Image (cartoon, rainbow, N blue to C red):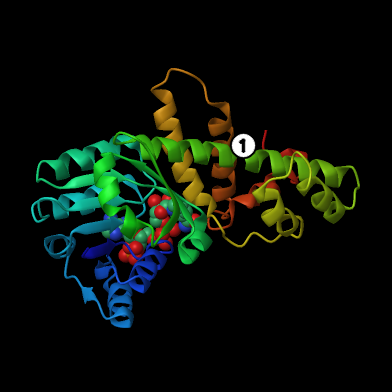
Amino acid sequence: MKTGVIGLGAMGKHMAMNLHKQDHLYSVWNRSREKAADLAGECGVSCAESPAALAADCELIIICVSRDADVLEVVNAMADHVRPGTVVVDTSTVSSDTAKEAARKLEDHGAGFLDCPVSGGVEGARNATLAMMAGGDAAALDKVRPVLAAIAANIVHIGPTGSGQACKAVNQLMAAGINQAVTEALAFGQQMGLDMDKVVDVVSNGAAGNWFLSHRGKTMLRGTFEPGFKLSLHYKDLNICKAMGEKTGKNWPMVEMTLLHYRKLMEQGYGDEDISALFRLKTADPASSPG
Ligand code: NAP
């Protein structure tokens, strides 16, 4: 299946390389052309002039760009050129409403659309071990599943268009809660005067153990916040959760609290750090504490 990738950032470039390794990659496009030219040269595939040119050539198009407006910009640019029967898979993290709008646009031109956000970070993208949450037509997913298997180890059809993004919002809200719990508990342990490396080791293997504690616990205790998952990206995702949550008429306090804390950290210049930088606020002196 002739497969094109649009968006060769931290995630998209690895997806493209993994598709290439399985002989699926046909064409790439990136807004900053140099990234696309380099990858196309390395893989010996076509470097498309525009999203429209890529759309005219491909049977499967995988998008991985930043935000809602970016996805719609790319979809609008492709819509008049996409071939009937082509499937467009958006792996960006955006809102369910954006997924529905993109699907409508493409379906008007005879193409299919699946919202397929991913979880697993840059490591998952590099190692092709991403978890993929798919929304849209199950038959369209079955058609492209063998190709998507080159980038994701676990692909689950959640339901109709938009449900993949709603599932990703569940994931992001849960990640916020885990971040709050781990950073606060470790700051509490420090205040108790404990040997915190021992605390991380023993707690990681008990009922409160989790991936975030095991992988980020000791680094945050040493004041190292190299990006695994950028705080500013999680902030974007929690704003998506907030907008989706507002439509339910219920309160989602974890979302509100984490947005407030991330905003403070971003104002202090920590937006490009890992989300575990929340530990900075939990250990700050009370005058500047999170509240
Ligand atoms: P990134 O490294 O910042 O890359 C963003 C990509 O989007 C770049 O290729 C950028 O092009 C392109 N782009 C942005 N605006 C565009 C526009 N208006 N038109 C066309 N292209 C545009 O981001 P990333 O980490 O790869 O993340 C991509 C998506 O995956 C995001 O929605 C993110 O939330 C999601 N995600 C990320 C992770 C993670 O750990 N990083 C994990 C799961 C999901 P340029 O090169 O020209 O800037």
Residue 32 in the image, given as x and y percentages of width and height? 29, 69
The residue carrying mark 1 is 177
- Amino acid type, label 1: Gly
The quadrant holding residue 9 is bottom left
Q: Is residue 279 above or below residue 224?
A: above
Q: Is residue 225 above or below residue 185?
A: below
Q: Is residue 95 left or right of residue 224?
A: left
Q: Nearer the viewer, residue 37 or 188?
A: 37
Q: Is residue 135 visible?
A: yes
Residue 172 in the image, given as x and y percentages of width and height? 51, 41
Q: Residue at x 25, y 36 (%)?
A: 100
Q: Nearer the viewer, residue 31 or 45?
A: 45
Q: Is residue 288 visible?
A: no
Q: Residue at x 68, y 55 (%)?
A: 216
The quadrant holding residue 5 is bottom left
Q: Is residue 106 left or right of residue 124?
A: left
Q: Is residue 201 left or right of residue 92?
A: right
SS at badge 1: helix
Q: Residue at x 65, y 47 (%)?
A: 278
Q: Quadrant of the N terminus?
A: bottom left
Residue situated furthest top in the rendering: 249
Q: Nearer the viewer, residue 156 or 195?
A: 156
Q: Is residue 226 above or below residue 265?
A: below
The quadrant holding residue 220 is bottom right
Q: Residues within 10 Å of mark 1 (few under 14, many from 20)?
A: some
Residue 90 in the image, given as x and y percentages of width and height? 31, 50
Residue 165 in the image, given as x and y percentages of width and height? 38, 39
